[in-house]
Image: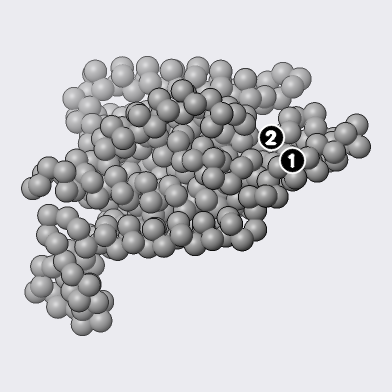
Amino acid sequence: MTVIAERERTREEDRTRGRSGLGLSAGLLVALGVLAMVSFLSITLGARGVGPGTIWTAFTDYDQSSAAQTVIREMRVPRTLLGLAVGVALGLGGAILQGATRNPLADPGIMGVNAGAAAFIVVSIMIFGTMPLSVYVWVAFLGAGAATALVYTVASFGREGATPVKLALAGAAVSAALYSITTGTVLMNTQALNELRFWQVGSLAGRYWPVLLQAAPFIVVASVVALACGRLLNGLALGDDMATALGQRVRATRALLFVTVAVLCGAATAACGPIVFVGLVVPHAARAICGPDYRWIMVYTAVLSPIILLGADIIGRLALGASELQVGVVLGVLGAPAFIALVRFRNLAEL
């Protein structure tokens, strides 16, 4: 069995060797350049346009009486940094879920992240009343983590443990139960409905330094762990039996991966609300570029995801002139054709 497993791993490495090395490194440098450009545009573009000189002055010779400099320091920069962090978190979370469950349509919603965060928010509003946004971040984070833990616990019952099929079924069941709690609560409490509508649209607007400072430590630590899990995901991609033959502890590996997903997606969802399609589509784009090696998939996903998120945020700012479309709405419109293409061209979805 071990000999067969070694042959499978060698064959997998041979498949990706042609795409690795200088080609993928050069592509990554190009993607990083695009990310830097999109980040710069995120700071400069909006209802109030600013130039590079104003940005430089805002940090070297800050004038509190200057509205443009205040907008840059207090709004544009934290919003851009939050977009970078949330994009990385959602992309890596989606890539891990697709690899751990071997489900090409897996995204953070499959583990009850969105449903858990929403349920905890509306229940806390019903009990404690309206709270500051910074408090909602912690409440939503706890809800996302609790829902993910519940899904994994339910899926772990039985001899086989948390298999991909059981995880998908458990996620659907737990999400349905939590959405029922959310719906029942908002029907009885108008205040909870109004607050949930503000959070559930998925937005970077209005989330500035306090929210960024709360979510960033969790995202940074979990992202480092996620980027180090490429080899583990490569083992799971061969199947549970093959991974076990290679010496991998499958149950412990999946537990680590789902804890990482809970922290990544829980923090991102708590900070900005449920943002769709990033965790679903971007890992497939990365896989199409660099092949099945998750060591490269994770790195490319971490770079491409914030490009997509910040790009959608910029489009939302400019599309309606004085008004603004929230990034969750823009991604919903742009992500639907990408999702249809993902289903139509099944070769991109094979794991």
Q: Is the residue marked by circle 2 packed among few (<14), some (14-19), or many (20+) residues within 10 Å?
A: many
In this picture, residue 158 sits left or right of residue 79? right
Residue 232 vertical position relative to residue 336 in the rendered view, above or below: below
**Which secondary structure lies at badge 1?**
helix
Residue 90 vertical position relative to residue 69 in the rendered view, above or below: above
Location of the N terminus by quadrant is: top right
Q: Earlier in the sequence, mark 2 or mark 1?
A: 1
Q: Which circle, 2 or 1, is nearer the viewer?
A: 1
Residue type at numbered disc 2: Ala
Residue 74's spot in the image, x, y percent? Answer: 22, 63
In this picture, residue 2 sits left or right of residue 109? right
Disc number at residue 237? 2
Determine the image quadrant of residue 60.
bottom left
Residue at 74%, 40% in the rendered image: 12
Residue assigned mark 1: 12
Mark 2–mark 1 CB contact (< 8 Å) = yes
In this picture, residue 296 sits left or right of residue 286? right
Viewer-proximal residue among 259 and 61? 61
Residue 165's spot in the image, x, y percent? Answer: 62, 20
Viewer-proximal residue among 205 and 50? 50
